[in-house]
């Protein structure tokens, strides 16, 4: 897979998590407690500006699903993905970084858009 281009999402920001399968993988389905190995791009819902991408670091990101190690929007949004799948997640602030934001990269109260590729399960 190649790094996706994530553009602006039309309409108002959603009140709850939006999960949209772009590609449904044909590999194993990730379950809570397993380690999901993903490539991702994250952009601001408001501007479409990229704030983070594992693709830019040249290596995937791994996290234990359902263990609270990532934002809740990821724990809920990656659940059920299959290896080889690509999914768009639109994460409202209460499932993301809330009112604190992250430094100068993610403003407080931001709705975030991620395109996540599940590349492996550990």
Image: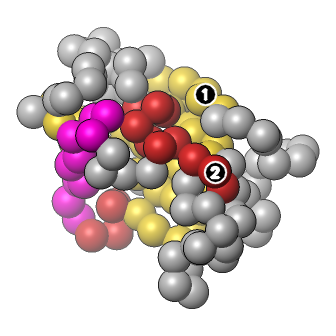
Tell me the distance, in whole angstroms, between the alpha carbons under discs 1 and 2. 19 Å
The correct choice, above or below, for 20 with respect to 49 in the image is above
Contact, mark 1 vs mark 2 (Cβ under 8 Å): no
Quarter of the figure that contains the C terminus: top left
Q: Is residue 24 left or right of residue 25?
A: right
Question: From where the camera sits, is residue 113 visible?
Answer: no
Residue 100, image x and y in percent? Answer: 59, 73
The correct choice, above or below, for 20 with respect to 112 in the image is above
- The question of residue 11 being in magenta is answered with no
- The question of residue 62 being in magenta is answered with yes
Q: SS class of the residue under badge 1? A: strand
Front of the two marks 1 and 2: 2
Going from N to C along the chain, the mark reached first, 1 or 2, is: 1
- In the picture of the structure, the residue carrying the numbered disc 2 is 94
The span shown in magenta is: 58-67
The correct choice, above or below, for 66 with respect to 61 in the image is above
Which residue is found at the position 40% from the left and 37% from the top? 75
Q: Residue furthest bottom?
A: 104
Residue 70, image x and y in percent? Answer: 36, 51
Q: Is residue 110 left or right of residue 85?
A: right
The quadrant holding residue 117 is: top left
- In the picture of the structure, the residue carrying the numbered disc 1 is 20
């Amino acid at each position: 897979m190649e790094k996706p281009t994530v553009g602006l999402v039309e309409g108002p920001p959603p009140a709850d998590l939006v999960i949209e399968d772009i590609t449904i993988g044909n590999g194993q389905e990730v379950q809570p407690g397993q380690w999901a190995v993903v490539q991702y791009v994250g952009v601001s819902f408001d501007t479409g500006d990229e704030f983070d991408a594992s693709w830019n670091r040249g290596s995937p990101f791994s996290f234990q699903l359902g263990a609270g190690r990532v934002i809740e929007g990821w724990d809920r949004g990656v659940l059920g993905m299959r290896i080889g799948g690509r999914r768009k997640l639109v994460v409202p602030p209460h499932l993301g970084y809330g009112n604190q934001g992250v430094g100068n990269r993610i403003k407080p109260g931001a709705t975030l858009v991620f395109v996540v590729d599940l590349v492996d399960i550990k």
